[in-house]
């Protein structure tokens, strides 16, 4: 920590910061009662705990017990992970600790909206983020004796020339073998952790096998080898790379692609759980933000597709859910891993459609949080292309049927169904059957391979939901624009 503070030019200096609205004030000695305090814009150094809730939370702050917790919280009422976090703070000389379940009113939508909108500054200003990587829930301590397989063992090595060499070694954690990834623990699968990692300036990961240090300049493990799987996404370094000139939109796509691979307990958190990162990215993009996309980077931001190759997803599209998360043109509506089209010097993206207007209605106080509705007015070339599918539950079965010699696919956002001659998103109750329909596509742009002077064209699939009203159904990439050669420019509204 001291080396980071003294030597890392890319890391912000450690200093007192404005405390979050509420923090836990820790006792001087282990076992002392702690209390929940409202800080009144006080400045000091504090730590944040990144942890897994598990199936339940033994203690949390509600409007009904707020006054009681402000009077004091008995040490023995804290779950093991919270006690361990307080012990780490004591060792580091920190008097304040922020834990989401205790510092946000869990039964107040208004307080949750306000506090979730401040995640950016809370994590960015914290002196240290304590990551309880090895704890699947708050009842499993992370400060404990390691399993024997991770403890160092002493033995003697007899060399061929007769020398006897004393060796001290431990089992490989997986850091040196790409096919043997270190277990990231349950915490490493949580979507909320992506922005926590991205925003934190210093993180201590308490893993099963070792202690891992992560900051904006480096990642260090006890064995001095980068742990594969645990921190290899290098999210903590992404912010520094943006400050050094990395295209912020490409960086955002990297962050989102990592984020959507993780799990959420509540799908309604799809936008809130990345809102802190979005607030930080706004300082780089200076663009309006709508449901996970940046207006100044459209139509490129519209060129996302479901990543069916992702090992966590398999080859079956999901059915459409009635719960509204975002407009169909925005990636949070997909509830699945997604990938984006790149844009760099070797593959520059050229827009072939124009954004006329885009709007989203926020459903809370968080400017980067959930939305209740949205619409996109887009002008571009629209073509009608035959689509056939012999198995709607297989993502690879949706074929463009204009030319049998071309193996071209539609990548569906969900399972699709023929509904009275119109292609629509299928619900679990819909009866699926093979279909052959003519479907509308709108061309968004192309990316050029500079080295071989070839282009790939990108379009999204449209389903009609009313007169002049459409929803997005999927995506396709083409090695030619033949389908759109005679297509007229049309202005359409997508919801």
Image (cartoon, rainbow, N blue to C red):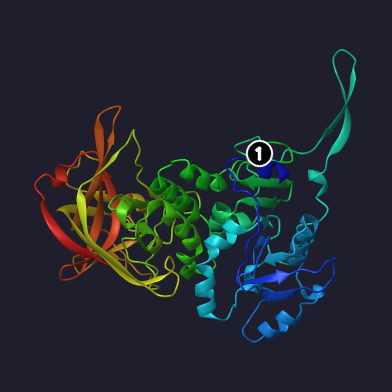
Horizontal and vertical percent for residue 326?
37, 67
Residue at 46 percent of width and 70 percent of height: 268
Horizontal and vertical percent for residue 447?
28, 40
Mark 1 neighbour density, 10 Å: few (under 14) some (14–19) many (20 or more): few
* Quadrant into which the C terminus falls: bottom left
Q: Which residue is at the far bottom?
A: 64
- Which corner quadrant of the image does residue 320 belong to? bottom left
Q: Is residue 151 above or below residue 474?
A: above
Q: Is residue 47 above or below residue 213?
A: below
- Which corner quadrant of the image does residue 473 belong to? bottom left
Camera-side residue of 347 and 463:
347
Check disc 1 and report the residue beneath it: 7
Residue at 39 percent of width and 48 percent of height: 249
Horizontal and vertical percent for residue 134?
71, 55
Q: Judge whether residue 56 can be spotted in this image.
A: no
Q: Judge whether residue 158 can be spotted in this image.
A: yes
Residue 385 relative to residue 83: left or right: left
Q: Is residue 162 above or below residue 416?
A: above
Residue 159 relative to residue 330: left or right: right
């Amino acid at each position: 920590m001291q080396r980071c503070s003294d030597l890392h030019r890319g890391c912000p200096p450690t200093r007192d910061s404005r405390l979050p609205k509420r923090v836990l004030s820790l006792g001087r000695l282990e076992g002392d009662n702690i209390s929940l305090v409202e800080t009144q814009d006080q400045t000091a150094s504090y730590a944040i705990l990144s942890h897994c809730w598990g199936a339940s939370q033994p203690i949390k702050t509600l409007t009904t017990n707020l006054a009681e917790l402000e009077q004091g919280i008995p040490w023995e009422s804290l779950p093991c992970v919270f006690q361990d976090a307080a012990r780490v703070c004591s060792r580091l000389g920190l008097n304040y600790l922020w834990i989401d379940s205790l510092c946000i009113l869990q039964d107040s939508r208004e307080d949750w909206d306000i506090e979730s909108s401040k995640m950016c500054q809370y994590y960015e200003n914290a002196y240290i983020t304590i990551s309880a990587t090895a704890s699947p829930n708050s009842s499993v301590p992370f400060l404990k004796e390691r399993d024997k397989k991770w403890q160092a063992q002493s033995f003697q090595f007899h060399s061929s020339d007769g020398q006897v060499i004393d060796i001290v070694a431990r089992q490989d954690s997986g850091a040196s073998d790409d096919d043997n990834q270190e277990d990231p623990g349950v915490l490493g699968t949580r979507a909320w952790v992506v922005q926590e990692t991205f925003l934190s300036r210093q993180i201590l990961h308490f893993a099963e096998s070792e202690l891992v240090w992560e900051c904006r300049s480096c990642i260090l493990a006890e064995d001095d080898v980068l742990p594969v799987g645990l921190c290899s996404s290098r999210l903590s370094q992404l912010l520094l790379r943006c400050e050094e000139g990395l295209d912020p939109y490409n960086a955002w796509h990297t962050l989102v692609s990592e984020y959507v691979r993780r799990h959420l307990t509540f799908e309604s958190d799809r936008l809130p759980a990345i809102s802190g990162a979005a607030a930080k990215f706004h300082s780089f993009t200076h663009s309006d933000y709508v449901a996970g996309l940046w207006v100044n980077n459209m139509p490129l931001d519209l060129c996302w597709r479901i990543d069916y190759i992702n090992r966590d997803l398999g080859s079956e599209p999901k059915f459409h859910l009635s719960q509204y998360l975002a407009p169909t043109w925005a990636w949070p509506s997909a509830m699945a891993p997604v990938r984006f089209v790149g844009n760099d010097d070797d593959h520059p993206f050229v827009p072939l459609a124009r954004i006329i207007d885009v709007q989203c209605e926020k459903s809370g106080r968080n400017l980067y949080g959930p939305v209740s509705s949205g619409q996109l007015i887009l002008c571009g070339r629209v073509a009608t292309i035959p689509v056939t599918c012999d198995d709607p539950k297989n993502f690879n079965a949706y074929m463009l049927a204009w030319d049998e010699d071309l193996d071209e696919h539609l990548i569906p956002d969900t399972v699709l169904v023929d509904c009275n001659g119109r292609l629509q998103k299928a619900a679990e109750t819909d009866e699926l059957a093979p279909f052959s329909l003519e479907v509308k596509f709108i061309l968004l742009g192309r990316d050029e391979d500079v080295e071989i002077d070839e282009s790939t064209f990108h379009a999204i699939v449209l389903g009609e939901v009313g007169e002049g009203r459409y929803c997005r159904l999927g995506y396709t990439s083409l090695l030619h624009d033949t389908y759109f050669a005679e297509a007229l420019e049309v202005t359409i509204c997508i919801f």
